[in-house]
Structure formats: structure tokens, C-alpha cells
Image: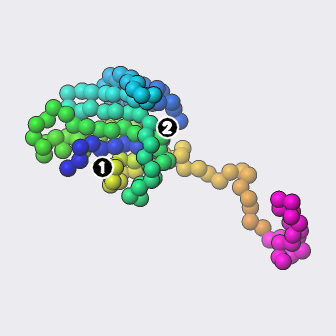
Amino acid sequence: MSQDIDILVNAELSLDGLAKEVEALLGIPSHCVTENDETWYEYQDEHTFLTLGNHDYVNDQGIDFESYEYDIEVFAINIKAAEERQQWLYESARRIFHTLQETQKYALVLVDNLQVKLEEFIPEAYQKEPSQYAIQSQTLPEDIQLFVAGHHTSCFE
């Protein structure tokens, strides 16, 4: 059974900016915590406790943690029955994930116990189109000369 579910977030906002947006979207007041040069935000209502901050996870279990700057950890609280607490955790995490997804602003991954990817969302704005400076493929003459890092060579030697 999971103790928490994580929502990895890639946002073009500072931690403070994202914290304010999450507070407004979820309608749960937050407070900032700073300890040992780390800063994160905490949110709590009757049955849900969240933390939002940076993370230092490395890619693991086929999950690209390093592409996401922020982590929202979701915990179920004040529910005694284990099955009910687990159900509340999953439902709350998915509700938060989908609320963030609806904004179409953030790349998101929903992860169970930092080991199982449950859901992923990449907004269209994050799906990059080829740059206007992308190299176009073309046929070059066989006798073209190439100068690379101080060495003169023929491409076809």
C-alpha cells in the first residue's frame, strides 16, 4: 500500500509562482516552510496533506524524474481504515492531477510510490515543433571539403 502518491510537474514558473497557482486551483491555503536551505509549500484540508517543492530524484523504473522540476507529494490523513485511506489517496491524487492537466500549462506525471507511472500528460505547448534553424537534408557534391576543429579533411576519405 502506498503511503503517498507523487505528481511530478514541469512548469515555466518559480516555486513561489507554482505554489500560488496550485493554491488557487485547489482552493486549499498553503504555507511556506524553509528548513536547512530547502523551501517547500504545504497544503492541508480535512483528509489531504500535500507538499510542493523541488526534488532531486534521478531517472529510475523507466520514469524520467529529471525532466520535472517540481514534486507534489499527496498524503491521505485523518482516515483510520486503511482501505478507505488508500482509496482517498488515489482519488485525491488523480483529482489534483486532472485539475492541473485541465489548465494545459504543465507537463505532469502521476507516480505511485516513486516506482509505478500511473498517468502522464504533456500539453501541446511542450511538444516542440522543428526549429526554423533545423538542418535540412540535402545531397552534397562528393568532392566537398570539410574543416572541423582545426583539421582539414574530405568528407569522403
Q: Secondary structure at mark 2?
A: loop
In three-dimensional space, the C-alpha distance between marks 2 and 1, rounded to whole angstroms, equals 21 Å
Q: Which quarter of the figure is the C terminus placed in?
A: bottom right
**Which label number is shown at residue 62?**
none
Q: From the image, tell me which residue sits under label 1.
A: 112
| Residue at the limit of the structure toward the front, as seen here | 36
Residue ID at (36%, 37%): 72
In screen coordinates, is 104 left or right of 117?
right
Residue sitting at 43 percent across and 46 percent down?
57
Per the rendered image, the range of residues in magenta is 139-157
Pointer 2 or 1: first along the chain: 2
x, y percent for residue 93 = 29, 41
Point out the frontmost of discs 2 and 1: 1
Give the x, y percent position of residue 149.
Answer: 83, 59
Question: Which residue is labeled 2 in the image?
Answer: 11
Residue 143 falls within the magenta-colored stretch = yes
Is residue 39 found inside the magenta-colored segment of the image?
no
Residue at the (83%, 61%) spot, across then down: 148
The answer to whether residue 101 is seen in the rendering is no
Say what secondary structure mark 1 lies in: strand
What is the three-letter code of the residue carrying label 1? Asp
